[in-house]
Image: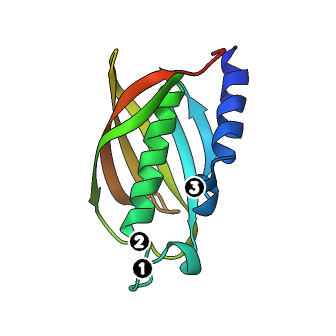
């Protein structure tokens, strides 16, 4: 499968994920070892008691971005470990952006990093995760 068709496959694959749909995440850009996804911050869905994005919603966004970055290398993965540092609160807004990047592509594990930015590109959070490789995408 060529890269363009594989990118289309990834978008369709993740757009049909119930959890991704629940949080209204969307793939914006895909490259080899890199992905950019967006998620709105909607008051009735994503916010905590203080009216800003819940840390769990942002952690889920980061985990998804880093997992898809692994998938761009045609590897199926599960999260082994995830660390996130919250820099500032994310107010209700049309979209925050997560950029997930592979920093180490090993034979059994993949290490990734992610930055979450608001609509003005201010840094909201930084994350790092290790993923265990469970297989490859068929036909990839």
Q: Residue at x 42, y 50 (%)?
A: 62
Q: Is residue 136 above or below residue 35?
A: above
State if disc 1 and disc 3 touch (CB < 8 Å): no
**Tag 1 residue:** 48
The residue at 63%/45% (across/down) is 28
Q: How many marks?
A: 3
Q: Residues within 10 Å of mark 2 (few under 14, many from 20)?
A: some
Q: Nearer the viewer, residue 108 or 127?
A: 108
Q: Is residue 57 above or below residue 37?
A: below
Measured Cα–Cα span from mark 3 to mark 2: 15 Å
Which residue is painted at 47% across and 54% down in the image? 61
Identify residue for label 3.
19
In the picture of the structure, the residue carrying the numbered disc 2 is 54
Q: Residues within 10 Å of mark 1 (few under 14, many from 20)?
A: some
> Quadrant where the N terminus lies?
top right
Q: Nearer the viewer, mark 3 or mark 2?
A: 3
Q: Residue at x 46, y 57 (%)?
A: 121
């Amino acid at each position: 499968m060529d890269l363009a068709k594989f990118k289309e496959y990834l978008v369709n694959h993740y757009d049909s994920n119930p959890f991704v749909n629940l949080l209204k995440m969307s793939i914006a850009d895909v490259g080899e070892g890199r992905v950019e996804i967006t998620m709105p911050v909607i008051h009735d869905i994503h916010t905590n008691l203080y009216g800003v994005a819940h840390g769990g919603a942002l952690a889920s966004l980061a985990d998804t971005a880093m997992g898809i970055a692994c998938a761009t290398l045609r590897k199926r993965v599960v999260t082994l470990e995830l660390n996130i540092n919250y820099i500032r609160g994310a107010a209700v807004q049309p979209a925050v952006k997560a950029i997930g990047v592979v920093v180490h592509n090993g034979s059994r594990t993949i290490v990734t990093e992610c930055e979450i930015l608001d609509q003005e590109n201010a840094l909201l959070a930084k994350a790092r995760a290790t993923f265990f490789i469970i297989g490859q995408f068929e036909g990839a």
